[in-house]
Image: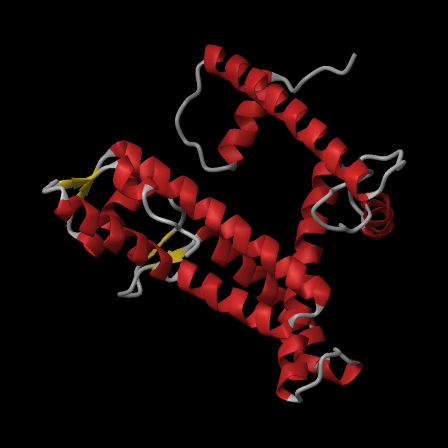
Amino acid sequence: MAKPWAPSHVSEVAKGLGVDHRISGEVKEKLVEMLHLRLKQITREMEEETLLNEPGKKTLSDPNRTRLGFSRTRGLMIEEIENVESVSSAAVVNANEILENYLKNSLLSAAEEADNERVGTIKIRHMSSKTTSSDNIQQTETSLNESSEEVSISNGQKIESLSPVNIKNIMKQLSGKKLDNDAVEELLLLYYDYASDLEYNLQKNIQQGDLSSIKNSLEKYEKLMMLGWMRRILKSASEKADYENSNSIKIEHIVAIDPWS
């Protein structure tokens, strides 16, 4: 029977995700239990969707999109290493994420060139030297890291990541109202759900070659990163709070808004 992750390992993973607080032993054990239960749910859902997409398939796969092959990437990495002896699964997963993001950005750049020519097919001439140069590869990776870790505020100020503490400060600047803790948590969940939905639609549109939808998704993503989406939600929530003569934005003011409209 497969063993779940060690509590200490989960704690180290949490540190890498930006959790600076100390985690008690009891909480570490609870986290392992929570992750294990969630993995069971994920596996069952993926199995159902895999068989729905390809009846009779014997191997579990990502039902949302095709990913770069794990074993191929690992084999190519093994050929490149010089000062270490092996390549871990974590290294391969990280490399595939970087490669897939690089692929996406390269094709988006080429898609813009194709769109300028009013053609629906990306051809080799659209893959400009800027797209394929090593300098651009580095810039792409840097911008990806920055975009995932920073959110811009209208005055140019940036925060490294969204959290209940700094999101409250941003919201005070944008709405002028206090936010209840439950409202902050709900807004954070909505933010990441909306971002995930945008990413999924963008990937789907890239696969379908739908250039107009790709542009639309990119515009929405830019608004999200510049907090345009956040301002819209907060403005609507503030109006609902004003209507109820409330001095603060509560969770019911947030959940009453359609974030996808």
Position of residue 174 measured from the top left corner of the image (x, y, whole percent): 22, 55
Q: Closest to the observer: 92 or 56?
A: 56
Q: Quadrant of residue 153?
A: bottom left
Q: Is residue 157 left or right of residue 28?
A: left
Q: Position of residue 90 (x, y in %)?
A: 70, 38
Q: How many numbered marks does the figure carry?
A: 0
Q: Nearer the viewer, residue 187 or 138?
A: 187
Residue 169's place in the image compared with 99, above or below, is above
Q: Quadrant of the N terminus?
A: top right
Q: Is residue 163 visible?
A: no
The residue at 44%/32% (across/down) is 19
Percent x, y for residue 8? 57, 19
The answer, for residue 230, to whether it is visible in the render is: yes
Instruction: Say above or below: 9 vs 186.
Output: above
Drawn side of residue 180 relative to residue 121, left or right: left
Q: Is residue 248 left or right of residue 55?
A: left
Residue at the image point whose x is 72% and y is 50% from the top: 65
